[in-house]
Image (cartoon, grey):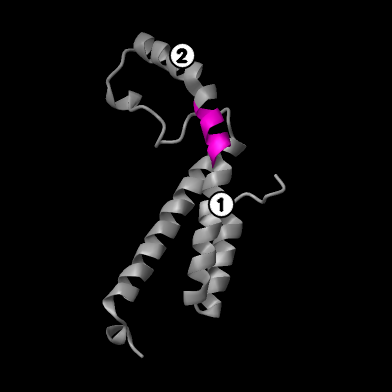
Amino acid sequence: MGRADLPMPVTAMTAMVLVATFIAGAIVGIGADRWLRPHQQPSPMMALPLAELGLSPDQEARARAIIDAHRGELEAIVRANFPKVRAIHDQLAAELRPILSPDQQHRLDEWRRRRLPSRDQ
């Protein structure tokens, strides 16, 4: 049975599951990055565009101090929500596995091992 033989809803659903998996992976990756390296600058999704504002050195120093004052709050939110994001990602992978070939399942498993921190950490 070729792709043309599949009903559109199955094809659309498969595409949506794949997109959702990649989005969840990106979210988990960002969360893991912030969780594992909390003393670095915020990820691009959480950072303000300071470089694009044309700030003077004094303004940049003051802006960074303001951002640093709120860093703990942002990190706490990421830490608190990371288990929820991980659970959603696990559910997506569980639902995706049945539609994948054994080779694709292996590639998904390898990708998850590379991208997601182990639960022991």
Residue to which mark 2 is pinned: 65
Spatial CA distance of label 2 from label 1 is: 34 Å
Is 80 within the magenta?
yes
Q: Compared with residue 115, is residue 5 higher up or lower down, i.e. above or below?
A: below
Which x, y percent locates residue 20? 40, 57
Q: Position of residue 47 (x, y in %)?
A: 40, 30
The quarter of the picture where the C terminus appears is top right
Q: Is residue 70 above or below residue 12?
A: above
Quarter of the figure with the N terminus: bottom left
The answer, for residue 34, to whether it is visible in the render is: no
The residue beneath circle 1 is 87
Mark 2, Cα crowd under 10 Å, few <14 / some 14-19 / many 20+, is few
Q: Is residue 67 above or below residue 49?
A: above
Please name the residue shown 46% across and 52% down the image. 24
Instruction: Say which label, 2 or 1, has the lower sequence index.
Output: 2
Instruction: Left or right? Give the position of 78 relative to 62.
Output: right
The region drawn magenta spans 74-81
| Amino acid type of the residue that numbered disc 1 sits on in the rendered structure | Ala
